[in-house]
Image (cartoon, helix red, strand yellow):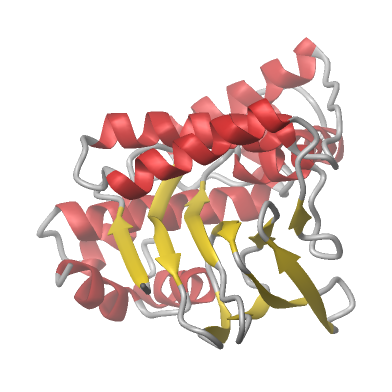
Amino acid sequence: MPEQIMHIFPHVNFADLTMFQFGKHSCDPFYSRGPYVHNHYLFHYVRSGKGNLYSENSDGQIIRHNIEAGQGFMIWPKQVVSYAADGDDPWNYFWVEFDGFKARELVAESGLTVNQPIYTSKDKNLERKMINAMRHLADNGNASPFELIGYCYLFLDAYVASSAHRKKTAHSSLQNFYVQEILLFIENHYHEEIGVEDLAAICNLDRSHVGKIFKSLMGTNLRDFLIRYRVRKACEMMKDSSKSITEISTLVGYPNLFSFSRTFKSIVGQSPREWRSQNMLR
């Protein structure tokens, strides 16, 4: 019998990894979603049945992927996708929408890409751990945020470790130190007028070199990371405080409200006012 359970994660105050929504769905025949674009990573694991994923590749082409029970698929932020259950054997899946500073690095380590988004397992024991973590999330949506984020970590750890396409990463301890220093500086100074030059200066390295180190570990450049961090902080403030959008704009390092609104919409897909209105209703 068709069943759908969806939970919204109650907090976004976890910077390294956080969830947005998660649940499970037993689909009707031919049930479909999209085409649409998500703002975060979205992973589905197919428990039974089958269906099709239509996802945009790196050349902007829409590619069809046939997916069966025991497989999964990853959707990337800003990627155009749609997916549909089979008419005779519709799929039943768990799903988790997540993001954070470490999200891109973990997805990259799993070996999945926009050109190869299909998850298959190389280790059934680890795959079961992943499934159990996703099941716990879907069945315990009212648990505390710390319990939920703990199971998110368990899910992602097992997902990466079990992926048949997993890539080993090797970064020097010095590179990790530089990145941690930058992350700490952003956390403490994001509300100030800082730029890429300021972030490079704390490592005593030139902008180009520190930019390469940061991108190799974090999967994004310094400028985009700083922008997204500020937007995430703005979202937290809009949900958890009564401050005006003008005040919040200044508090996240944008004294110019127009510049903040334009940047926010480019990242989230909605104006700050629209986003706040929808999220305050939840």
Viewer-proximal residue among 96 and 182: 96
Which residue is nearer to you in this view: 271 or 99? 99
Relative vertical location of residue 16 with respect to residue 72 in this rendering, above or below = above
Residue 14 visible, this orientation: yes
The answer to whether 96 appears left or right of 124 in the picture is left
Name the residue rendered at 63%, 81% in the picture: 86
Which residue is found at the position 54% from the left and 60% from the top? 40
For residue 81, above or below residue 201: below
Q: Position of residue 151 (x, y in %)?
A: 42, 32
Observer-nearest residue: 35 or 85?
Answer: 85
Q: Quadrant of the N terminus?
A: bottom left
Lateral position of residue 111 relative to residue 2, left or right: right
Q: Is residue 266 above or below residue 152?
A: below
Residue 5 picture quarter: bottom left
Whether residue 17 is visible here, answered yes or no, is: no
Which residue is found at the position 84% from the left and 60% from the top? 116
Residue 75, given in percent of the width and then of the height, sits at 64, 64
Residue 27 at what x, y percent from top left? 46, 75
Q: Is residue 124 above or below residue 258?
A: above
Residue that extends furthest to the left in the rendered view of this protein: 242
Q: How many marks?
A: 0
- Name the residue: 76% across, 40% down: 121
Q: Give the quadrant of residue 49.
A: bottom right
Please provide percent x and percent y for residue 65: 79, 73
Quadrant in the picture for the C terminus = bottom left
- Nearest the viewer among 117 and 30 is 30
